[in-house]
C-alpha cells in the first residue's frame, strides 16, 4: 500500500472561466493515469483563484486611512494592505514585509494569502494585478468533485492547497485551504496502541499532511505543475471541511 | 516524475541496541524495493529513540520543586514534568494537559516530545516508562545514511520525524526533527516566475513537507509501519540540518 503523488502535465495558463475539470481530463489523456475511485486531486490555490476570477487591479483600489497606517508599519503598498484588511477578520501581527492575519476563511496566514507573483498584467504600469484566495474553497473543491463524479462515476477527493509560513519554523509548507470528499482530521483518541494501552490522545491532520506532500510535488519554480494526482491515501474518503482544521480562538494560545 | 511513499513491512518491535539499518534491509528483502541512489528513508522518532535506549523509568525520577509547581498547573505527573524541563531550553506556554516548550534541540513542541504510548513496561506499576527524543537526531540520521552507503554504495537521504501540533490548526502533522543527505529548505528567492518577474521571496520547507507525507503513511494506529521509503523527491539530495528549520528567536513573533 503505497501513496503515489503525480504532478499532471501540460496544464495551460489558467484564465477566468476555465473549467479545471476539463483541464484535468485533458492532462490525464496524455498520461497513463485513469481516474479510479479514491483518487484525490490537489489543486494549487492560485489556479482555482484565477479560474474564479479573483484577480484585482490595484489601480482600482483605494486605501482607507487604516490601511495607509498599517502599510507604513509593514512597508507595503497601501492598496494591497487595503485588500488584505478586506479579506481578513483580524490583524494578528505586523512586521516589515508581512501582515499576519486571521483570514475571513478562519486560518492564520501572511498577507491574507494575496499573491503577487505569476499574475499577468498587460505590461502597463497602471495595471498591477494581485490574486485573492477563492471565496469558498470548500465549495470550489466540492464543485470539482461533483463534476468529476458526473462525468466519470468515480468517487474522488479534491483539495485546494496554499503555501503557509509557520510560527516557529523556517520555510513555507503546503496546507489545505479547502477540501471535499476527503477527511480533514482522523481522530485516534481512544484507539489502543500496541501494548493495549488506550492512551492515544491524537487527532491527526491528515488533510494538511496530504497538502504538504502535494505541495512538494507542485514545484514552486515556474508554477508549472499546479495539479497533483494522489493515489493510495490510507484512510476512507469521507467528507471533510476546512473548518475542522481551524483551531478555535478560545483554544489558541498564540494569538 | 512521481513521488512514491511506501511503508516498510514486517518491522519488529524495536529494542535498545537494535540496528535500524539491518531492520531496513530485512524488510526490503521481503518487498519489491531495491535501494537506489536518491531514495529516502523516513523513520518515526519513536523507533530511533528506542534503538538508542532513550527509555526512562519514571520511578527513578525525582521532581524538583519547579517541576511540582508546573505539574500542578498542567495537571501532569510531576516526574514527567521534571523530564520535560530537563529536555527543554524554555517553557513557552502551559495549559492543562500540555506544556509547550522550546526543546533543547531548538524546536517548539508539546511536552518536549516525550512519549507515553507504545512504551512497554513489565506490567509492574512501579515501572512506568516514557520515551525521550533522540539526543542528536541529525547525527542519528547521518549514521544510518553512512551505514547504508557502506553496505550498498547507494547515496540515500535519511529523515527522522515526529508528530507536532500547530499553533493555529487542529491535528498533528509529521515534522522533521533530524535529517542527513537531504535538504531542509529550498531557497527560491530571486527565482523568476512564469512572467519573468523576479518577485519570488519563498523559502520552502521541503523536509517538513516530506515529513508530513511520510507521517501520513506511517499510520498512527498501532505504530506498525514506523519506516517509510520515499522515491522521487524532486530536488537534488544535498546535506541539510535540523537547525535550518528552526526560526531564530529574534524572528519569532509568537513566543
Image (cartoon, coloured by chain):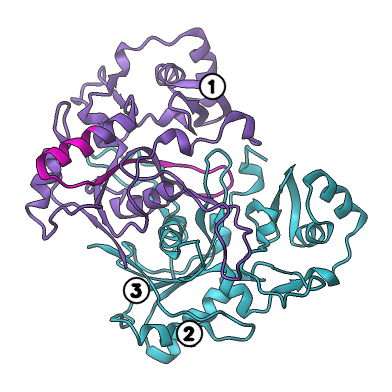
Chain colours: A cyan, B purple
Name which residue lies at 61% across and 68% down: A118
Local SS, label 1:
strand
Q: Inspect this view and state whether residue A123 appears.
A: yes
Residue on which the image places disc 1: B90
* Quadrant (top left, top right, bottom left, bottom right) of the C terminus of chain A: top right
Q: Going 45% across and 20% down the picture, which residue do you hit?
A: B81
Question: What is the CA distance from the residue labelled 1 to the residue labelled 3?
Answer: 44 Å
- Disc 3 crowd rating (10 Å Cα; few below 14, some 14-19, many 20+) is many
- Residue B181 in percent (x, y) is at 30, 42
Q: Which residues make up the magenta segment?
A: B143-170
Image-based side of A225 in relation to A114, left or right = left
Tag 1 subunit: B
* Front disc: 1 or 3: 1
Mark 2 falls on what kind of element?
helix
The reply, left or right, for residue A35 in relation to residue B226 is: right
Return the mark for residue A23. Answer: 2
**Residue B169: x %, y % from top left:** 55, 49
Question: Which mark is drawn over residue A38?
Answer: 3
Query: Disc 2 vs disc 3: Cβ atoms closer than 8 Å?
Result: no
Q: Quadrant of residue A51?
A: bottom right
Chain letter of the residue carrying label 3 = A
Q: Is residue A18 left or right of residue B185?
A: right
Q: Secondary structure at mark 3?
A: loop
Q: Give residue A209's position: percent from left, percent from top.
A: 42, 55
Q: Residues within 10 Å of mark 2 (few under 14, many from 20)?
A: some
Q: Look at 23% across and 24% down and name the residue there.
A: B53
Return the disc, 2 or 3, that comes first in the chain's sequence.
Answer: 2
Q: Residue furthest bottom?
A: A151
Measured from the top left, where is residue B63 in percent x and y?
A: 43, 11
Amino acid at each position: 500500500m503505497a501513496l503515489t503523488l503525480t504532478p499532471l502535465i501540460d496544464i495551460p495558463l489558467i484564465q477566468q472561466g476555465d473549467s479545471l475539470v476539463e483541464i484535468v481530463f485533458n492532462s490525464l489523456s496524455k498520461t497513463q493515469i485513469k481516474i479510479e475511485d479514491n483518487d484525490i486531486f490537489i489543486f494549487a490555490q492560485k489556479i482555482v483563484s484565477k479560474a474564479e476570477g479573483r484577480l484585482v487591479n490595484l489601480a482600482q483600489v483605494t486605501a482607507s486611512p487604516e490601511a495607509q497606517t498599517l502599510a507604513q508599519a509593514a512597508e507595503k503598498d497601501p492598496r494591497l494592505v487595503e485588500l488584505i484588511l478586506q479579506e481578513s477578520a483580524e490583524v494578528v501581527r505586523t512586521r516589515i514585509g508581512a501582515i499576519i492575519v486571521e483570514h475571513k476563511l478562519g486560518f492564520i496566514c501572511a498577507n491574507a494569502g494575496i499573491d503577487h507573483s505569476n499574475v499577468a498584467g498587460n505590461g502597463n504600469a497602471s495595471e498591477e494585478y494581485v490574486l485573492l484566495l477563492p471565496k469558498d474553497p470548500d465549495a470550489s473543491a466540492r464543485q470539482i468533485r461533483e463534476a468529476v463524479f458526473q462525468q466519470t462515476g468515480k468517487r474522488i477527493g479534491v483539495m485546494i492547497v496554499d503555501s503557509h509560513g509557520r510560527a516557529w519554523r523556517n520555510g513555507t509548507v503546503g496546507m489545505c485551504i479547502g477540501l471535499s470528499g476527503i477527511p480533514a482530521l482522523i481522530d485516534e483518541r481512544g484507539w489502543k496502541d500496541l501494548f493495549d494501552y488506550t492512551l492515544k490522545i491524537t487527532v491527526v491532520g491528515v488533510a494538511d499532511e496530504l497538502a504538504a506532500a502535494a505541495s512538494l510535488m507542485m514545484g514552486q519554480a515556474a508554477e508549472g505543475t499546479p495539479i497533483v494526482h494522489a493515489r493510495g491515501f490510507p484512510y476512507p474518503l469521507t467528507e471533510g471541511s476546512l473548518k475542522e482544521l481551524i483551531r478555535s480562538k478560545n483554544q489558541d494560545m498564540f494569538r
